[in-house]
Image (tube, grey):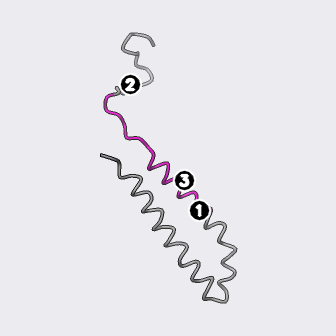
Amino acid sequence: MGSTRPALAITAGLLVALAVIAPLAWLVHTRDWGVTLILLAPFVIYGLMRLGRALADWADTPPPSSDLPIRGPDEPDRDGAA
């Protein structure tokens, strides 16, 4: 059974991009003052790229393995070496 994180990340990224880009493009196209919003476009794109990278990192995170023992930094190894 595969993880659903990649599908959720893609869906969330596309929904956020659509929710941000569509109103921005509509305002640029329909308003006289909307042309000045073009100055915001590089920052909006940069923010969406950062969001995409964060979602990709979140989607690629492997689940914790239950067969590996968790030990603290002060605990010795099983063979007695520190």
Which of the two labelled residues, at mark 2 and mark 1, occupies the earlier sequence position? 1
Q: Disc 3 residue type?
A: Arg
Q: Disc 1 residue type?
A: Gly
Residue found 51% across the figure and 53% down from its top: 54
Q: Of circles 2 and 3, which is in front? A: 3
**Structural distance between the alpha carbons of marks 2 and 1:** 38 Å
Residue found 49% across the figure and 48% down from its top: 57
- Count of numbered marks: 3
Q: Is 62 on the left or on the right of 49, as rendered?
A: left
Tell me, yes or no, whether the highlighted magenta stretch contains residue 51. Answer: yes
Q: Name the residue carrying label 2.
A: 71
- Report the disc number at residue 57: none
Q: Disc 2 residue type?
A: Arg
Q: Name the residue carrying label 3.
A: 53
Tell me, yes or no, whether the highlighted magenta stretch contains residue 38. Answer: no
Q: Secondary structure at mark 3?
A: helix
Tell me which segment is drawn in magenta.
46-67
Residue found 53% across the figure and 77% down from its top: 22
The reply to whether callout 3 and callout 1 are in contact (CB within 8 Å) is no
Q: Secondary structure at mark 2?
A: loop
Q: Secondary structure at mark 1?
A: helix
Q: Position of residue 9 (x, y in %)?
A: 43, 57
Q: Position of residue 71 (x, y in %)?
A: 38, 25
- Report the disc number at residue 47: 1
